């Protein structure tokens, strides 16, 4: 009950701040104050509007907001995100483009489960859609998953990726961004042994912690400093009575958000101060740069406790992927078994989350893969976010990834294509 009370206390604080913002906005917006030429009322209204919106966004899943894609015919084609496989902890979502011939490139985008929704990759999806058929892993908020659905740790996550890859079949290009990079590598290795006919054509790993010790960052330092007992005591709570997952142990999204903001507190404080002043002066808008960024940044999701703790312990502390000793359901995963999946590594020179070298370590583990099927790219000046979104991704990295996919789709020694292994959608 103590953990549940703490969870509900955080939600109460969030709800109270949202209410305070709404009250200040409503109070300062009464027409009668127009008779009093004092800037205090405009500032109060602006503060309330920004505060209400910010705290409300913390419990709202953002929409994909990708409405159309321009086709080769110059016309706008409607985009419809559809759940192709439904699972308790995450869905396989396809972005189906209406009235357009199907593209040859088929891309599975593995989204991170690291505190934000898969919509964090919205711009990545939008940049891929004009030239490819795109699927994405859409992970669910743990607070909304009943305890009766059981656990979900990194082994379950890996098995989900295996099932999704089997469903899509061997003509798929897998792109894993950040946190899922080591697990996507493990899933590919599992397929190499269990179902080689379902292996993807290529695997692109972007800024992921394959070997966290290859280059130290604040994230890896934190993992070494804190014991698992301390981490469980400080970070894990039980979902409160408001949500369907009541009683489930989670790493709460609101707690994660507090950590995110504290890492760059001065910058966030300045951004909100500037936004309030702009709103008071009537210079803001509904979809300005501030709102577009913070609508996504503030929308956080709970992770299951077992997923968060197993990630810290097995990926960062024990380095099971880096040492090639990872297991799924008691079965050893041997990364050297991957011999026919071309692999590309993308890193950012200024990445302070997964520093250069952490993701590159994957190529040393792929001892069974010929050197000509390995590729790497270090993007100068790019930080963590820049290697999958923004100008660095659009102008430099995306064309390289497409070229890598196309080159390896044409390999003469590629295994004969076999039909995709179809898995029926289920809720279990």
Image (cartoon, grey):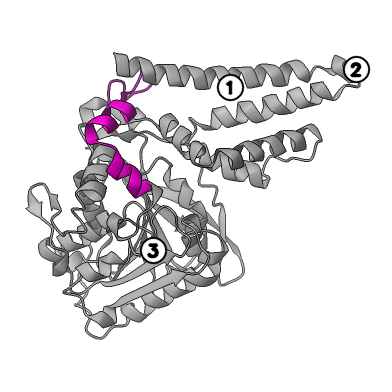
Q: Which mark is residue 36?
A: 2
- Identity of the residue drawn at 57% across and 40% down: 294
Q: Tell me if residue 33 can be seen.
A: yes
In the picture as drawn, the residue positioned furthest to the bottom comes out as 412
Q: Nearer the viewer, mark 2 or mark 3?
A: 3
- Residue holding disc 1: 18
The image quadrant that residue 250 belongs to is top left
Tell me the SS state at disc 3.
loop
The residue sitting at 50% across, 36% down in the picture is 262
Q: Is residue 142 above or below residue 193?
A: above
Q: Which of 290/103 is in front?
A: 290
Chain-order first, disc 2 or disc 3: 2
Q: Earlier in the sequence, mark 3 or mark 1?
A: 1
* Extent of the magenta region: 219-248
Residue 78 vertical placement versus 143 (above, below): below
Numbered disc 2: secondary structure: loop
Examine the rendered structure and indicate whether residue 112 appears above or below residue 258: below
269 falls in the magenta region: no
Task: State how far apart marks 3 and 1 are (Cα).
Answer: 40 Å
Residue 121 is left or right of residue 361, and the answer is right
The residue located at (30%, 43%) in the rendering is: 223
Q: Which residue is mark 3?
A: 356
Q: Which mark is residue 409?
A: none
């Amino acid at each position: 009950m103590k953990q549940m009370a703490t969870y509900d206390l955080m939600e109460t604080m969030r709800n109270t701040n949202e209410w305070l913002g709404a009250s200040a906005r409503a109070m300062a917006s009464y027409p009668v104050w127009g008779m009093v030429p004092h800037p205090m009322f405009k500032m109060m209204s602006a503060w309330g509007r920004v505060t209400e919106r910010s705290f409300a966004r913390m419990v709202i899943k953002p929409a994909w907001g990708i409405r159309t894609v321009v086709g080769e015919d110059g016309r706008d084609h409607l985009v419809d995100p559809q759940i192709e496989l439904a699972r308790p902890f995450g869905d396989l979502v396809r972005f189906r483009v209406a009235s357009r011939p199907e593209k040859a490139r088929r891309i599975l985008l593995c989204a991170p489960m690291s505190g934000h929704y898969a919509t964090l990759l919205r711009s990545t999806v939008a940049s891929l859609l004009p030239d490819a058929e795109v699927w994405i892993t859409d992970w669910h908020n743990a607070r909304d998953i009943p305890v009766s659905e059981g656990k979900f740790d990194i082994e379950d996550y890996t098995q989900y990726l295996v099932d999704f890859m089997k469903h899509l079949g061997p003509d798929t290009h897998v792109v894993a961004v950040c946190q899922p990079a080591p697990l996507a590598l493990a899933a590919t290795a599992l397929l190499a042994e269990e179902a080689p006919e379902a292996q993807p054509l290529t695997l692109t790993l972007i800024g992921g912690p394959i070997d966290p010790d290859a280059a130290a960052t604040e994230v890896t330092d934190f993992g070494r400093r804190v014991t698992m007992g301390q981490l469980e005591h400080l970070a894990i709570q039980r979902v409160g009575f408001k949500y369907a997952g009541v009683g489930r142990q989670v790493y709460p999204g609101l707690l994660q958000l507090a950590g995110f903001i504290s890492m760059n507190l001065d910058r966030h404080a300045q951004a909100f101060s500037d936004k309030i002043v702009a709103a008071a002066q009537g210079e803001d808008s509904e979809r300005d740069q501030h709102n577009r960024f913070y609508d996504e940044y503030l929308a956080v999701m709970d992770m299951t406790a077992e997923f968060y703790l197993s990630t810290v312990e097995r990926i960062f502390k024990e380095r099971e992927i880096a040492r090639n000793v990872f297991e799924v359901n008691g079965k050893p995963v041997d990364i050297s078994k991957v011999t026919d999946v071309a692999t590309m590594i993308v890193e950012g020179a200024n990445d302070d989350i997964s520093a250069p070298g952490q993701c590159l370590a994957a190529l040393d583990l792929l001892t069974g893969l010929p050197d000509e099927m390995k590729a790497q790219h270090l993007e100068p000046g790019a930080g963590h976010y820049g290697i999958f979104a923004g100008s660095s991704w659009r102008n430099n990295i995306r064309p390289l990834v497409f070229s890598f996919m196309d080159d390896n789709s044409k390999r003469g020694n590629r295994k004969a294509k076999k039909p995709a292994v179809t898995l029926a959608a289920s809720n279990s």
